[in-house]
Image: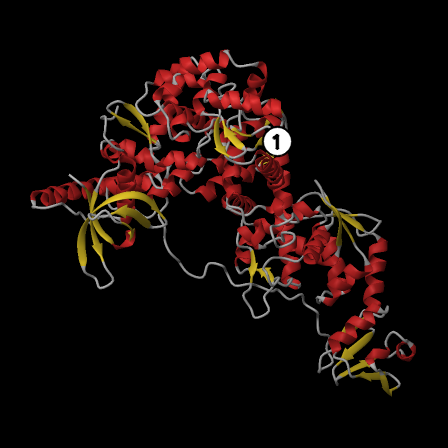
Amino acid sequence: MATPSRSLADDIRGRSDAELVDLVLARPDLARPAPADLTGLAARASTRASVQRAVEALDRGHLQVLEALLVAGDGVPLERVRELLGTDDVTLVEALVEDLWRRALVWRGADGEHVVRTVPEVLGTSLAGLGPPLRELRQTFVPEDADPVAIGQALAEAPSEARTMLERMTWGPPLGVMPTGPAGRSTARWLLERHLLVPVASDRVMLPREVGLALRGGHLHRAPELTPPDIEARSVSLVDAVAGGAASELLTHVDELAAAWGAEPPRVLRAGGLSVRDLRAVQDVLDVDADRTAFVVEVAHAAGLVADDGEVVPVWAPTSEIDDWSSAESGHRWATLALAWFASTRAPHLVGRRASGSGTANALGPDVQWPAIRAVRRDVLRELASLEPGQAADAESLRARLTWRRPNRPSAVLGEAVDAVLREAEWLGVTGRGALSPAGRVLVDEEPPEGDRLAAVAAAMSPHLPAPVDHVLVQADLTAVAPGPLVGGLGSFMRLSADVESRGGATVYRFTPESVRRALDAGWSAAEFLDTVRRSSRTPVPQPLEYLVTDVARRHGQTRIGGAAAYVRSDDESVLDTMLASRDLAPLQLRRLAPTVLVSTANPRTLVDLLRDNGFAPVHEGSDGTVVHAETPKRRAGSRRRGPGPVVSPVDRDNTRSLVSGLRVAEATAVQRRADEEARPGPRLEAMDPVVTLSLLRDAVADRHGVWIGYSDGHGTTTRHLIHPQRVEGGRVRATDESGHERSWSVHRITGASLEA
């Protein structure tokens, strides 16, 4: 139990080191940047920005207790707080108040608990749907107006029409519109005369807080929600196998994405991101729906495997890290993607949605950036981790529980985000059939016992990933079945020489004339092609495949193209006759130089593409007469890690202990300095952090206390003034000086401050 204090600063200075560590861990923003001393820590903890972060992190139970403390008032016994909440669980209320004190949203004085002054500014004037108290609504307020007995007697005497009007405003909003009809006017006048309603505008009335509480039977809410709702769960089987299969499929998708963008990288939009057309092209390659395609692209980008290459004409291309990642062990590859997704602040489910003022959100674009999604992922996975292994949560009950956890977020937006996280976790393999996988449990544990989080996550997933296979089953219908993920070399060959027809537990490839020609263009001969298939297949190579490869190889290179600007030569004159007669080839301006030679003004690459589009099968010939193999280029973007960058220590327990130790030493020095200042004659003006100065000025406004300040003018001269602050806003304090004149003072020019003795 902490020693009763006179202010939040006294309360924080009186806490033990362990309690200070808990405070900083609960509110990490207090440690960035590190405060000068404990007084600076207390001042920062009372700023609006920090308090708002802390309040937004509260669940509904803590928020209801905080509202009850504000309505009850400073120094009121907890029994009154419990009555406002309508609960008999004294232990639970005390525990929630203890948590609020630990987060420095409440401090303990000699007379009881006090809510930090900034909290009402964050929560607003309408607490739990109640209006402001009578003392704030009426200029001629007298304590008798707020007497509960008098209010109860007036309510008991209220006519039925007046009672109906009050009941409509009981549970909020407390602001109403004056009725227009004569009967309504007379009813409203009856309520106004008895101060059950207070006019706030010519046609607006407000239900005072005291009246609202009386109508609610003395309770803030219809029912207290101090504990989270239960999650409905069901038992599922084969979680590990399903999760491992999804993880393996994701690795295949990222490989195919890297191969596609390495050959033909898409352009970066002027506003950033990937165009809808290019995303659809990736969707065709992966053969999945649009949402899953956007997820694969965003995860690969988050893991640093694809990036903007930063050129004059920028494109999205695989980074130099893709090669190391591709050659790593499967568990390590998956762990890299899973950790990147877990820590990412991008929300793939927003791709294709309407973005504010900029049309639809594009994949990899700025509109997909949503920092709140990272906290939603953590919340969802932690709730799943609270269930027994093999238990899948009911989505509706999970949404209700997370809505209780984050009451300050719109329920519709939160529900959509929860559904997206559940869907992405299933695609990733973090969950299987809705239940958290073993690797998912390690992923949620941000400080694994092994210390190396990447290795721990990889080790948890590796046993459940399908083992790579080194063979396929070639069938007579020109298809080949891969019974699992293929080893690197065979996988590359199959992606080059065949088209993916279907995916699943086994991948089905189909050999086509175009796919065989693709392999021949890359330098494979017919003999090498068939020999590779023969060595890799557990079934004999069927004759239809041999006929297909032989036929394509026979026609492949039958026509050869070179530059002169470009020439076409063929031993078969009839082929050249057909080219010359074709209208579709007229743009090439072909001209015969010899019975077996044509020339064109087009470049060789254009000749090859256009002739192939018209049913011919030419190859590119070099200046020495050899075939130029069309090896697929590998485009690489520079690594995103261009240097060590700024090093920021994490706000973990070890670093926080070191911070608290330093604050203790700094506070002792500050106490000694204040003692030396007090020994000097005249008002004491201690130099302090601007945050501390603002806190002192706000306290002076609330307590109507004078403050001595040292003020530096435009010439650098510092003068002393006794001011009485009226309000503090926008980095300035409005106050009256010694002569009684009101003026504005810039806080950044105040060199020191001290309360008037």
Check the picture and name the quadrant holding the C terminus.
Answer: top left
Measuring from the top left, give residue 601's x and y in whole percent.
78, 83
Q: In the visual, does 65 lie left or right of 562?
A: left
Residue 77 drawn above or below residue 62: above
Q: Is residue 600 visible?
A: yes
Measuring from the top left, give residue 280's x and y in whole percent.
71, 54
- Toward which corner of the image does residue 236 lie, by quadrant? top right
Residue 457 drawn above or below residue 230: below
Residue 577 drawn above or below residue 280: below
**In front: 618, or 338?**
338
Element type at marker 1? loop
**Which colouring convention does the figure follow?**
secondary structure
Residue 469 drawn above or below residue 639: above
Determine which residue is flagged by label 1. Answer: 434
Measuring from the top left, give residue 663's x and y in whole percent.
23, 42
**In front: 434, or 291?**
291
Q: Residues within 10 Å of mark 1 (few under 14, many from 20)?
A: many
- Toward which corner of the image does residue 513 lie, by quadrant? bottom right
Q: Residue furthest bottom?
A: 593
Measuring from the top left, give residue 623's x and y in whole percent.
71, 82
Residue visible at 61% across and 37% down in the picture: 416
In the image, what residue type sits under mark 1? Gly
**In front: 307, or 754?**
754
**In front: 108, or 664?**
108
Q: How many numbered callouts?
A: 1
Check the picture and name the quadrant holding the N terminus.
Answer: top left
Q: Is residue 89 visible?
A: no
